[in-house]
């Protein structure tokens, strides 16, 4: 089917999911929205994140997508059920795929989760993990310093190793055998995180697992997968400065993309 896959995120972090779709499902067309003017979502109250995610879902439905992906862990944590009840198409979040991969990878059942404040406070990862297996020991930790670190381009600097080590200190003696990177930005810090946790902890990247889930839904619902060849035309939108957004997107995806800024239509009263 020729309709696009709609992907939303609080900003540019969801491009990790986009890159994975381009790699695993190169024939699929993407329409992406990054809420760069209102990012980050991590520190925001859940009601606000739900409202923003609804607005974006509503905006993206005008492109008649065949599926909507919440690439943001914070949005998935607080808004997935709400969005599912409002749209007709399949809605995929990043939490269940990550949880499933972690349980599969774990031998001891001692699983860690790191994410934004919003994600960790919601308890969504615990819920998803316990639904898969009741036998798990789960340790969750909010790491609010890590997103600003990545967005400052500091993820390879000595400062990154120091901040990661300090942030993850509470997990160091927990004997976790897998750790879910429950935030779009954390794969950029995989090296310092792996070093801080030690060699017996496996890191789980939700973006990769999510695209396997997308792929499974598309091939299960046979009429959903795109079978034609040819280069699809992707569309990128953001709520903030489109020049900066276009620069980050083009460099991350290794291709020049067009991007436009969307101005929300404020409903007029009376
Ligand atoms: N990486 C991220 N966010 C940024 C950034 C970055 N600036 C440089 N790099 N800025 O996230 C966030 C705030 N912006 C967003 C756009 O609108 C204006 C405000 C990391 C995820 C990227 C997929 C470094 C950088 C880059 C290209 C690719 C990867 C990367 F420029 F880390
Ligand atoms: N995209 C968010 C997430 O995965 C991280 C950035 C933010 O806080 O907006 O939780």
Image (cartoon, grey):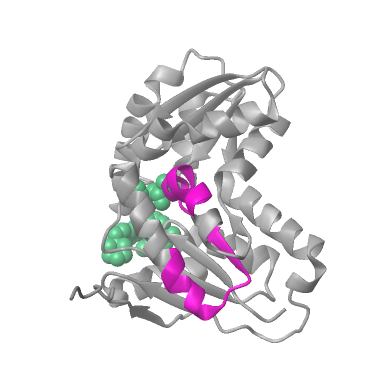
Ligand 1 quadrant?
bottom left
**Where's the N terminus, which quadrant?**
bottom right
Q: Is residue 225 above or below residue 112?
A: below
Q: Which residue is found at the position 64% from the left and 33% from the top?
A: 102
x then y, percent, for residue 241:
26, 73
Name the outermost residue toward the front: 270
Most foreground residue, 251 or 208? 208
Q: Number of callouts in the render? A: 0
x then y, percent, for residue 76:
48, 48
Q: Is 131 on the left-hand or right-hand side of 112?
A: right
Most foreground residue, 224 or 11? 224
Q: Is 36 on the left-hand or right-hand side of 127?
A: left
x then y, percent, for residue 239:
30, 70
Most foreground residue, 21 or 213? 213
**Where's the C terminus, which quadrant?**
bottom left
Q: Which residue is found at the position 34% from the left and 35% from the top?
A: 117
Residue 66 at least partly seen: yes
Q: Which residue is found at the position 42% from the left and 34% from the top?
A: 122
Residue 154 at least partly seen: no
Q: Judge whether residue 59 is colored magenta.
A: yes
Name the outermost residue toward the left: 270
Q: Judge whether residue 36 is colored magenta.
A: no
Name the outermost residue toward the top: 173
Most foreground residue, 90 or 125? 90
Q: Is residue 78 above or below residue 236?
A: above
Q: Is 196 on the left-hand or right-hand side of 22?
A: left
> Where is residue 223, by image quadrant?
bottom right
x then y, percent, for residue 248:
38, 68
Q: Which residue is found at the position 63% from the left and 60% from the top?
A: 90
In this picture, which residue range is highlighted in magenta?
A: 57-82
Magenta residues: mostly which secondary structure? helix
Q: Is residue 254 above or below residue 141?
A: below
């Amino acid at each position: 089917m020729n309709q696009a896959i709609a992907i939303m995120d609080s900003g540019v972090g969801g491009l990790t999911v986009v890159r994975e779709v381009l790699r695993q499902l190169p024939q699929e067309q993407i329409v992406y929205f990054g809420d760069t003017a209102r990012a980050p979502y991590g520190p925001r109250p859940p009601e606000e994140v739900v409202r923003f995610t609804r607005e974006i879902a509503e905006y993206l439905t005008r492109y008649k997508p065949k599926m909507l992906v919440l690439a943001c862990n914070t949005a998935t944590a607080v808004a997935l059920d709400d969005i599912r009840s409002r749209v007709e198409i399949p809605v995929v979040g990043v939490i269940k795929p990550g949880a499933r991969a972690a349980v599969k990878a774990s031998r001891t059942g001692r699983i860690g989760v790191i994410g934004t404040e919003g994600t960790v406070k919601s308890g969504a990862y615990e819920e998803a993990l316990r639904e898969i297996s009741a036998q798990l020991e789960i340790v969750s930790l909010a790491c609010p310093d890590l997103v600003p670190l990545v967005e400052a381009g500091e993820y390879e600097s000595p400062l990154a190793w120091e901040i990661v080590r300090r942030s993850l200190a509470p997990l160091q003696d927990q004997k976790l055998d897998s750790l879910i990177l429950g935030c779009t930005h954390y794969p950029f810090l995989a090296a310092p995180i792996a070093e801080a946790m030690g060699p017996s902890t496996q890191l789980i990247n939700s973006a990769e697992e999510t695209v396997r889930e997308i792929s499974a839904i598309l091939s299960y619902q046979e009429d959903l997968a795109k079978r034609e060849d040819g280069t699809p035309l992707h569309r990128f939108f953001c709520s903030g400065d489109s020049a900066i957004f276009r620069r980050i997107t083009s460099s991350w995806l290794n291709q020049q993309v067009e991007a436009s800024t969307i101005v929300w239509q404020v409903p007029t009263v009376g």
